[in-house]
Amino acid sequence: MNHPLQISSRCNTFLIITLGVMTLLFLAWPCYRVFVHYGIDVNEPWNAHFADAAMGRTPLYPGQDELITNNYPPMSFYGMRPTKPVTS
């Protein structure tokens, strides 16, 4: 017959190993994302497009016959415009 402390020790070892494996699995994605240099949010390409438009390359508010819409007034794009020569 097994001693109660021996059973408890095996259970603790199993739980610690399981917790370690789960920790590694849940840390894999954040550690991978640290080294990937592109935006996660689905809104990032639109922000880049409107920021580019605010720099004067295309009109920020497109015409009514175009397929691209601007649903919010991106005043921050105009606010960041003077910093472009310094930050680029």
Image: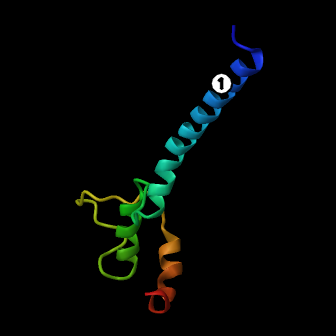
Q: Residue at x 44, y 56 (%)?
A: 32
| x 34%, y 68%: residue | 49
- Residue 43's image quarter? bottom left
In what quadrant of the picture does the C terminus appear? bottom left
> Is 7 on the left or on the right of 75, as rendered?
right
What x and y, as percent, mark residue 64? 28, 60
| Residue at 51% across, 87% down | 83
Residue 73 locus on image (x, y percent): 48, 65
Mark 1 lies on residue: 10
State the count of labels.
1
At a point 52% along the width and 72% down the height, the residue shown is: 75
* Most foreground residue, 81 or 70: 81
Taking the view exactly as shown, the residue that stands out farthest to the right is 5
| Secondary element at tag 1 | helix
Quadrant location of the N terminus in the rendered image:
top right
What scheme was used to colour the molecule? rainbow
- Residue 43 or 81: which is nearer the viewer? 43
Q: Amino acid at mark 1?
A: Arg
x then y, percent, for residue 13: 64, 31
Q: Position of residue 28 (x, y in %)?
A: 48, 49
Q: Please state which of residues 33 and 72 is positioned toward the viewer in this rendering.
A: 33
Considering every residue shown, the one lying at the far top of the view is 1
Query: Residue 6 occupies which quadrant of the picture?
Result: top right
Mark 1: few, some, or many residues within 10 Å (few <14, many ≥20)? few
Residue 34 or residue 74, whichever sits in front:
34
User: Going by the picture, which residue comes out furthest to the bottom?
Assistant: 85
| 37 lies above or below 88 | above
